[in-house]
Image (cartoon, rainbow, N blue to C red):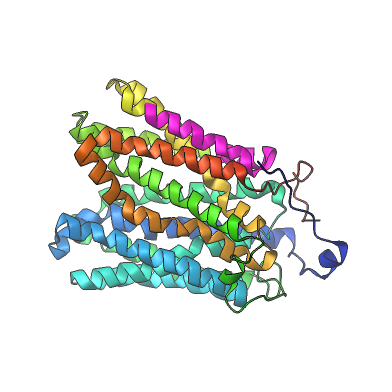
Amino acid sequence: MTTAISEPLPRHAVASAPPRPGLVRQVAIFALLMVCEFLYGWAWNTVDVLRPFIRASLDLSLVAAGSAYSAQGAGALIGAVVIGQLADRFGRRRMFPLLVAGYGAMLIAGAWVASYPELLAQRFALGLFTGASFPVGVGIYVNLFGPGVRGRLASLLNACFSLAIVALGFAMGQVGPGNWRVLLWGGGIPPLVLAMAGYALIPAGSAIDLVRRKGAALPISELFAPAVRRQTLALAAMTGLNFFGYAAFSGWLTTYLTGERHLSAALAGQLVAWQFTGNIAGGFFWGWAADRFGRRFNAIGFFIAALAIAGYLLVPSDVLVLKLLGLVYGATLCSSVIWGAWMAELYPPHLQSTAASIFNWGRLISFFAPLITARIAESAGMATAMSSAAVAFSLAALIWLTQRETLAPRRRTLAPDT
């Protein structure tokens, strides 16, 4: 296991680095990021929360309705890689407003979708912009404050995304089946306004906008330079295992609870809600822990998540026990809240958004996870298929522990990188 710490920049590099804006502007920019994260969460999750309405309006089969998520996920993978590179190459002041306005406009476009092919195209286009939200956002907030608070900043953004799901679910219950498109307008119009605010707030040429040194024409090629190629591949495998584990357990959870455990749909929904509650609370703990003990410390969370999965599949159908185990699973699953900032720290400053996009590379694995686990379920049972999630999270944690630590013990303040 390597224990190397990222070395501080030399003094001449610090002197030539673009300055950060004042504290008031820093806070304003992060507040904007939080609001945009909420709206990104709203836009992204309409594909799941509004699925019954979308399916009924277009008379889709279950498979066709579910494929809208696949189209959105494919767009997210491409958008994260392409727009993340553009942000590093041409500046986040230009690209952040573009992607925010993009997912707002594409969400509104969903109100005019009238056929299955149009739905796939609209969701793919929405994915292009929402997929870039994570890497470009990371490139902004890691330059707002010093490394000692980045975990807590990430946990705040995680909470905003999760709260968007709550708000969307509540709003869904307030509109009739024939008025669901108003939720697309409600989530799509604010980003169009906030995009202009982002362009005004982010100072041109600042550390938040871009680093002056420009590398290769395609920044992603630098992630595969000999010095960091093994690290990049390991991180990609780690994120892939994370997405596989989530799809293998959470993706089949309601099916397992209603089909194998014979619980009611209402009770299954309550158990899922407990996991969701744990995710919000756990995000704050793991963000603090990553700032206090280092980025690799959070790998412990994945080991605990694996144990919670095993317990969930083995214990009797005691609702209280399942709620508690679900709470633990949700709270430890989000130990990866630090990944965006950590991946940005593992690479040179001019690759921050491109490096953060590695998180989304794991989505490629998630495309195949349902097919693989369905085959296992058919031959060995649903519990066996879902237990593969515990293996995936354990392997991801092991890879995590072998990677480089980037937070020195002394760096736990709001001070800039030195």
Q: Nearer the viewer, residue 278 or 409?
A: 409
Q: Is the magenta stretch mostly helix, strand or loop?
A: helix
Residue at point 63%, 69% (across, down): 201
Q: Nearer the viewer, residue 52 or 343?
A: 343
* Residue 314 vertical placement versus 140 (above, below): above
Residue 113 in view (yes/no) = no
Question: Looking at the rendering, in which quadrant would you find the C terminus?
Answer: bottom right
Relative side of 267 to 106, left or right = left
| Position of residue 387 measured from the top left corner of the image (x, y, whole percent) | 35, 35
| Position of residue 42 measured from the top left corner of the image (x, y, whole percent) | 39, 57
**Is 401 part of what is drawn in magenta?**
no
**Is 287 part of what is drawn in magenta?**
yes
Residue found at the very far front of the displayed protein: 226
| Position of residue 393 measured from the top left corner of the image (x, y, whole percent) | 46, 40
The stretch in magenta equals: 283-310
Residue at point 61%, 50% (across, down): 153
Residue 375 in view (yes/no) = yes
